């Protein structure tokens, strides 16, 4: 895939962003679904098939996208999300090169990255995040302190009073797309439960304020980078979320279902792979216009999917014996969830 024509990697001060994210294929109607995942709209865990995605970020013909490396799915015999994350972080750490950085969302903690041995990372933090200095404060009198001073990057409300933010070590401003961005940096921090020690792994926290957003971005990384590079690398985390959308809406995986244990786990991973392939093919092929009015068509997966629908079944490609074109007429037969609902309704009526 790296030899794809037109593929350009996104590197920042020599580092390539390798994004890691989790997605879920929701199966609320599946009896005995092997796993559950938190649904933001329902505000609770719903039956779903969990898949972790790992890939590098670049662009093809000006379109930024993620090049997937691994789709790690839960096994039918081990459906624990925690065990799946342990496998994912181990595989990511083993495959990480010296010039690559792991970019993750706030669902992953700094301590989890430390336990996995990942030394180069960029993580999105919660707005209530706090850390401590890696040095003990000066002792004047009384009991000696065992922890470094508390660092609170962003002010917040607690029990009706305002907890002030800690003054930054370094302020930094720059212009981007006509907007003035500001970054506040706190250097050489450790987690709250860590006792200060020069041998500990430290990290820097960046609070980046953008006029286009209400809340500042709170990011942490152990690598010394310029604030504009930190922000750009964090935005490269977003394209990995496009893969599940294209797999469900463009490929049609949201209308497909399986009931055997292996197919329940395998179908979402295959759909993610098909959605990723659809995105790359759409970015490399000429954009087909919808009609005479479409004078500036864009290379989108939806346009390319409609182009493929109008093409006949391939005849010049030698397929395996178990893959063949279905000759029977099935246009009148209900399919997918509609067929299952009609079957249930008929059984209830009889």
Image: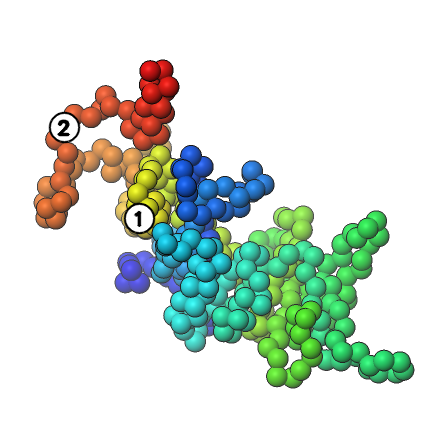
State left or right for residue 162 relative to residue 183: right
Crowd around label 2: few <14 · some 14–19 · many ≥20 (10 Å): few
State left or right for residue 270 relative to residue 224: left
Q: Is the image coloured rainbow, by chain, by secondary structure, or in one colour? A: rainbow
Q: Which residue is mark 1?
A: 262
Q: Position of residue 323 (x, y in %)?
A: 15, 43
View extreme (right): residue: 141
Please tell me which residue is depicted at 68% across the width and 60% down the height of the picture.
Answer: 129
Q: Quadrant of the N terminus?
A: bottom left
Please tell me which residue is depicted at 40% across the width and 67% down the height of the picture.
Answer: 91
Q: Position of residue 79 (x, y in %)?
A: 42, 53
Please tell me which residue is depicted at 43% across the width and 50% down the height of the picture.
Answer: 50
Q: Who is closer to the viewer here, 262 or 172?
A: 262
Give above or below for 84 relative to 255.
below
Q: Is residue 293 visible?
A: yes
Q: Quadrant of residue 90?
A: bottom left
Q: Quadrant of residue 5?
A: bottom left
Judged from the image, the secondary structure of the residue bearing numbered disc 2 is: loop
Q: Quadrant of the C terminus?
A: top left
State left or right for residue 189 relative to residue 346: right
Q: Which residue is mark 2?
A: 328
Crowd around label 1: few <14 · some 14–19 · many ≥20 (10 Å): few
- Sequence order check: which comes first, mark 2 or mark 1? 1
Please tell me which residue is depicted at 23% across the width and 21% down the height of the picture.
Answer: 332
Give above or below for 85 relative to 222.
above
Instruction: Give the label, 2 or 1, closer to the camera.
Output: 1
Q: Separation of disc 2 and disc 1 at Cα? A: 27 Å
Judged from the image, the secondary structure of the residue bearing numbered disc 1 is: helix
Q: Position of residue 182 (x, y in %)?
A: 67, 60
Give above or below for 102 relative to 341.
below
């Amino acid at each position: 895939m790296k030899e794809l024509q037109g593929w350009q990697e996104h590197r920042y001060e020599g580092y390539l962003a390798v994004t890691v994210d989790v997605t879920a294929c929701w199966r609320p109607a599946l009896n005995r679904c092997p796993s559950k995942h938190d649904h933001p709209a329902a505000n609770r865990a719903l039956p779903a098939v969990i898949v972790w995605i790992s890939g590098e970020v670049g662009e093809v013909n000006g379109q930024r996208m993620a090049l997937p490396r691994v789709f790690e799915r839960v096994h039918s015999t081990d459906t624990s999300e925690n065990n799946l994350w342990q496998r994912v972080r181990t595989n990511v750490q083993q495959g990480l090169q010296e010039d690559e950085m792991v970019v993750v969302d706030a669902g992953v903690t700094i301590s989890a990255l430390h336990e996995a041995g990942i030394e180069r990372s960029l993580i999105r933090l919660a707005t209530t995040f706090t850390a401590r200095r890696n040095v003990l404060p000066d002792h004047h009198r009384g009991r000696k302190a065992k922890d470094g001073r508390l660092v609170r990057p962003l002010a917040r409300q607690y029990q009706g009073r305002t907890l002030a933010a800690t003054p930054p070590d370094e302020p930094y401003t720059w212009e981007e797309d006509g907007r003035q961005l500001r970054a506040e940096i706190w250097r050489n921090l450790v987690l709250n439960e860590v006792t200060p020690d020069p041998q500990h792994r430290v990290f820097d926290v960046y609070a980046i304020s953008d006029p286009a957003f209400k809340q500042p971005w709170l990011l942490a990384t152990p690598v010394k980078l310029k604030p504009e590079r930190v922000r750009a690398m964090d935005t490269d985390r977003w394209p990995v979320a496009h893969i599940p959308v294209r797999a469900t809406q463009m490929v049609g995986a949201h209308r497909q279902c399986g009931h055997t244990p292996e197919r329940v786990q395998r179908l979402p991973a295959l759909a993610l792979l098909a959605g990723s392939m659809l995105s790359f093919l759409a970015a490399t092929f000429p954009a087909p216009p919808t009609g005479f009015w479409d004078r500036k068509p864009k290379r989108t997966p939806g346009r390319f999917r409609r182009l493929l629908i109008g093409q006949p079944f391939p005849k010049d490609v030698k397929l395996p014996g178990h893959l063949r074109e279905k000759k029977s007429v099935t246009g009148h037969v209900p399919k997918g969830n509609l067929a299952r609902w009609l079957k249930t309704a008929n059984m209830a009526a009889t």
